[in-house]
Image (cartoon, rainbow, N blue to C red):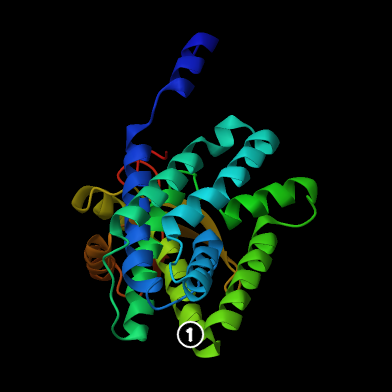
Amino acid sequence: MKKRDRAKAKGKINWMSVLKILLGSMLLALGLDIFLAPSNIVTGGITGIGIIIRDITRRVWGIGISLSITNLVINIPILVVAWIVKGRRYIARTALATVSLSGFLYLFEHITYSGNILLAAIYGGVLSGIGLGLVFTTQATTGGSDMIAAIVQHYVPHFSVSNFLLIIDGLIVCGGVLVFGLETAMYALIAVYITTAVSDRVVDGFHYSKAIYIISDHGQEIADAILQKIDRGVTGLNGRGMYTSTDKLVLLCTSSSKESVKIKQIVHSIDPKAFMIIHDAREVLGEGFIESVE
C-alpha cells in the first residue's frame, strides 16, 4: 500500500467505533444517572468526583451542580494536557466519548431510581460495565482518571498506568467515604466489582469456544472424522508419554460448545479409551470464528 493510501485509510472515520462509543456512553450515563448517582455510590473517576461535588454544592448552596457539567469542565483541561503530551490521535476517540457522556448525563439526569441501594449498585454496575466495555473495545476511554494516569505514567514510566489508576480511583472512593459514609462506600465496592467484571466480559467478547486436546492411538482416524462430520480444522502436535517413553500424536481442535459434544461422541465411538482435555477458550480469532480485529 502506498503512503498516500495509508494516510487516507488512517484519515477515514470508523463509523462502527463511533457507534460503539455513543452507545457505550449512553449506557454508562444511564447507569450513573438512574442508579449510582441518586444513591451517592462513588465508584471512582471524574463522575465519582462529580457525585461528591453535587452533594456538597447542594448542601452549601441548595443547588447541586450537574454531573454533566463537572464531567465536561474537569475533563477539558485533562484532554488538552493529554493532547500536548500524548498527541492528537491518542485522544480523538476519548474526546468523543467524554463529550457524548456529558451530553447523555444531561439528557438522563431527571430519570432516577431511589429504591434499594443494593439493587442500584448491581444494575448501575451492569450498565456501567457494558458501557465502558463498548468504549474500551474502540481503544478509547471516557477520559478522567484513565487519562490522568496515562499522563502521569508518561513522566514516571517505571510505574504502570493501572497502578496510577488504582491510586487515583482509590483516593476518589475515600473521598466518597468521608462525604457519604462507610456503608455507602461498601455498596460502591460492589458496583466497582460488577462494573469491572462486566466490562472485561464485553472487551473479551461473548464468543466462547472450546479448546479440545485428544490423545489416542487412533489419532488420524479421529482427525478425519472431525474434518468430515464437523468441518472443523484439526492440528496434530508431537507429544511423548513420559511414563511409557512412547511418541504420541496429540490432536488440537477448537469448536463451539455445541460442536464439542459431537466431537466427544465421535472420539468415544472410535476410541473409548482416548484421553481428552476440554477447556473454555475465551476468545478465538481466525477462520471459522472471529475473522477480523478492529
Q: Can residue 136 be seen here?
A: yes
Q: Is residue 287 left or right of residue 97?
A: left
Q: Is residue 140 left or right of residue 227?
A: right
Q: Is residue 135 left or right of residue 165?
A: left
Closest to the observer: 82 or 272? 82
Residue 285 lies, with reference to residue 127, above or below; the image says: above
Closest to the observer: 31 or 135? 31
Q: Give how far across and how far down residue 262 sits, in percent.
A: 21, 64
Q: Give how far across and how far down residue 213 sits, in percent.
A: 42, 63
Residue 87 lies, with reference to residue 9, above or below; the image says: below
Q: Quadrant of residue 132?
A: bottom left
Q: Which residue is mark 1?
A: 184
At horizontal 59% and vertical 57% (from top left) the residue drawn is 145
Badge 1 amino acid: Thr
Closest to the observer: 228 or 196? 196
Residue 114 lies, with reference to residue 201, above or below; the image says: below
At horizontal 31% and vertical 86% (from top left) the residue drawn is 116
Residue 178 lies, with reference to residue 221, above or below; the image says: below
